[in-house]
Image (cartoon, rainbow, N blue to C red):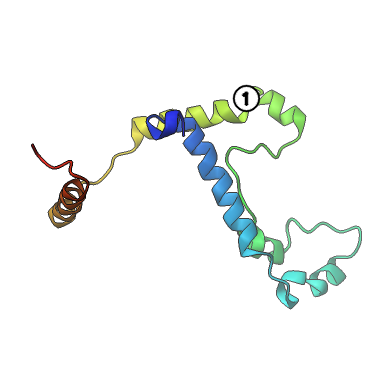
Amino acid sequence: MLESGMTCDLAQMVMDNETISLIRHLVRGVPVNDETLAVDVIDKIGPRGEFISSEHTLKHMREASLPILYHRDVRDTWEAEGRTDMATRAREIARRVTAEHTVEALPDEVLGEISRIVGAADVEVGAGAQ
Protein backbone atom coordinates (compact mmCIF):
# COMPACT_ATOMS: atom_id res chain seq x y z
CA MET A 1 0.00 0.00 0.00
CA LEU A 2 1.20 3.47 -0.84
CA GLU A 3 0.19 6.85 0.51
CA SER A 4 -1.49 5.44 3.63
CA GLY A 5 -3.93 3.34 1.67
CA MET A 6 -5.12 6.08 -0.66
CA THR A 7 -3.50 4.44 -3.68
CA CYS A 8 -2.11 1.04 -4.43
CA ASP A 9 0.22 -0.59 -6.90
CA LEU A 10 -1.46 -3.50 -8.67
CA ALA A 11 1.90 -5.12 -9.38
CA GLN A 12 2.70 -4.96 -5.66
CA MET A 13 -0.62 -6.65 -4.94
CA VAL A 14 0.34 -9.45 -7.35
CA MET A 15 3.71 -9.83 -5.59
CA ASP A 16 2.03 -9.78 -2.16
CA ASN A 17 -0.42 -12.45 -3.31
CA GLU A 18 2.48 -14.66 -4.41
CA THR A 19 4.31 -14.15 -1.11
CA ILE A 20 1.17 -14.90 0.95
CA SER A 21 0.58 -18.07 -1.08
CA LEU A 22 4.12 -19.26 -0.36
CA ILE A 23 3.78 -18.42 3.34
CA ARG A 24 0.50 -20.36 3.53
CA HIS A 25 2.25 -23.30 1.92
CA LEU A 26 5.06 -23.15 4.50
CA VAL A 27 2.70 -22.70 7.46
CA ARG A 28 0.81 -25.86 6.50
CA GLY A 29 4.05 -27.67 7.15
CA VAL A 30 5.51 -30.80 5.64
CA PRO A 31 3.73 -33.99 6.57
CA VAL A 32 6.12 -36.72 7.63
CA ASN A 33 4.74 -40.22 7.30
CA ASP A 34 5.44 -43.44 5.42
CA GLU A 35 3.87 -42.06 2.23
CA THR A 36 5.78 -38.78 2.20
CA LEU A 37 9.09 -40.25 3.31
CA ALA A 38 8.83 -42.78 0.46
CA VAL A 39 11.59 -44.98 1.85
CA ASP A 40 10.26 -47.90 -0.20
CA VAL A 41 10.44 -45.79 -3.39
CA ILE A 42 13.97 -44.64 -2.57
CA ASP A 43 15.00 -48.22 -1.89
CA LYS A 44 13.41 -49.44 -5.14
CA ILE A 45 14.92 -46.73 -7.38
CA GLY A 46 18.33 -46.71 -5.73
CA PRO A 47 21.05 -44.11 -5.24
CA ARG A 48 21.75 -43.41 -8.92
CA GLY A 49 18.19 -43.63 -10.17
CA GLU A 50 15.88 -40.81 -11.17
CA PHE A 51 12.65 -40.03 -9.35
CA ILE A 52 10.99 -37.59 -11.76
CA SER A 53 9.15 -40.27 -13.70
CA SER A 54 8.15 -42.35 -10.68
CA GLU A 55 4.46 -42.75 -9.91
CA HIS A 56 5.10 -41.45 -6.39
CA THR A 57 6.63 -38.19 -7.67
CA LEU A 58 3.77 -37.67 -10.12
CA LYS A 59 1.27 -38.27 -7.31
CA HIS A 60 2.88 -35.72 -4.97
CA MET A 61 4.37 -33.09 -7.26
CA ARG A 62 1.36 -30.78 -7.07
CA GLU A 63 1.79 -30.53 -3.31
CA ALA A 64 4.92 -28.44 -3.81
CA SER A 65 4.62 -24.68 -3.99
CA LEU A 66 4.37 -23.52 -7.57
CA PRO A 67 5.25 -19.83 -7.66
CA ILE A 68 4.53 -17.78 -10.75
CA LEU A 69 6.74 -14.79 -10.03
CA TYR A 70 9.74 -16.32 -8.28
CA HIS A 71 12.04 -17.62 -11.00
CA ARG A 72 13.31 -21.09 -10.07
CA ASP A 73 15.04 -21.98 -13.33
CA VAL A 74 18.77 -21.75 -13.91
CA ARG A 75 20.28 -18.44 -14.98
CA ASP A 76 20.62 -19.50 -18.64
CA THR A 77 16.86 -20.12 -18.84
CA TRP A 78 16.11 -16.80 -17.11
CA GLU A 79 18.36 -14.97 -19.58
CA ALA A 80 16.83 -16.78 -22.57
CA GLU A 81 13.36 -15.76 -21.35
CA GLY A 82 14.31 -12.08 -21.40
CA ARG A 83 15.88 -11.56 -17.95
CA THR A 84 12.74 -10.02 -16.50
CA ASP A 85 12.69 -9.27 -12.81
CA MET A 86 9.83 -10.08 -10.48
CA ALA A 87 8.35 -6.57 -10.58
CA THR A 88 8.21 -6.65 -14.38
CA ARG A 89 6.49 -10.05 -14.37
CA ALA A 90 4.05 -8.80 -11.71
CA ARG A 91 3.19 -5.72 -13.82
CA GLU A 92 2.53 -7.97 -16.84
CA ILE A 93 0.19 -10.16 -14.77
CA ALA A 94 -1.58 -7.12 -13.29
CA ARG A 95 -2.10 -5.65 -16.78
CA ARG A 96 -3.43 -8.95 -18.10
CA VAL A 97 -5.79 -9.40 -15.16
CA THR A 98 -7.17 -5.87 -15.41
CA ALA A 99 -7.63 -6.24 -19.17
CA GLU A 100 -9.20 -9.71 -19.19
CA HIS A 101 -10.89 -10.32 -15.85
CA THR A 102 -14.60 -9.68 -15.47
CA VAL A 103 -16.29 -9.46 -12.12
CA GLU A 104 -19.77 -10.83 -11.56
CA ALA A 105 -22.23 -8.33 -10.13
CA LEU A 106 -23.17 -8.81 -6.49
CA PRO A 107 -26.72 -9.98 -5.83
CA ASP A 108 -29.18 -7.19 -4.93
CA GLU A 109 -29.57 -8.47 -1.36
CA VAL A 110 -25.79 -8.26 -0.82
CA LEU A 111 -25.66 -4.75 -2.27
CA GLY A 112 -28.53 -3.78 0.01
CA GLU A 113 -26.77 -5.18 3.08
CA ILE A 114 -23.54 -3.34 2.20
CA SER A 115 -25.50 -0.13 1.76
CA ARG A 116 -27.21 -0.68 5.13
CA ILE A 117 -23.84 -1.28 6.89
CA VAL A 118 -22.23 1.79 5.29
CA GLY A 119 -25.26 3.91 6.15
CA ALA A 120 -25.16 2.76 9.80
CA ALA A 121 -21.43 3.49 9.98
CA ASP A 122 -21.96 6.96 8.50
CA VAL A 123 -24.58 7.70 11.15
CA GLU A 124 -22.30 6.37 13.89
CA VAL A 125 -19.42 8.68 12.94
CA GLY A 126 -21.65 11.63 12.05
CA ALA A 127 -20.95 11.45 8.34
CA GLY A 128 -24.53 10.78 7.25
CA ALA A 129 -26.31 12.72 4.51
CA GLN A 130 -26.43 16.42 5.29
Is residue 116 visible in this depiction of the protein?
yes
Please identify the quadrant where the C terminus is shown.
top left
> Relative to residue 69, is residue 95 depicted above or below?
above
Looking at the image, residue 123 sits to the left or right of residue 79; the answer is: left
Give percent across and percent down for residue 45: 84, 65
Q: Residue furthest top?
A: 82
Residue closest to the eye, 4 or 83: 4
Looking at the image, residue 116 sits to the left or right of residue 71; the answer is: left
Amino acid type, callout 1: Thr
Q: Secondary structure at mark 1?
A: loop
Give percent across and percent down for residue 85: 63, 27
Q: Residue furthest bottom?
A: 34
Query: Looking at the image, which residue is at 70% across and 40% down?
Result: 72
Query: Looking at the image, which residue is at 91% across and 61% down?
Result: 47
Looking at the image, residue 95 sits to the left or right of residue 33; the answer is: left
Query: Looking at the image, which residue is at 35% across and 30% down?
Result: 99
For mark 1, does the 10 Å Cα neighbourhood hold few (<14), some (14 to 19), or many (20 or more) residues? Answer: few
**Tag 1 residue:** 84
Looking at the image, residue 45 sits to the left or right of residue 57; the answer is: right
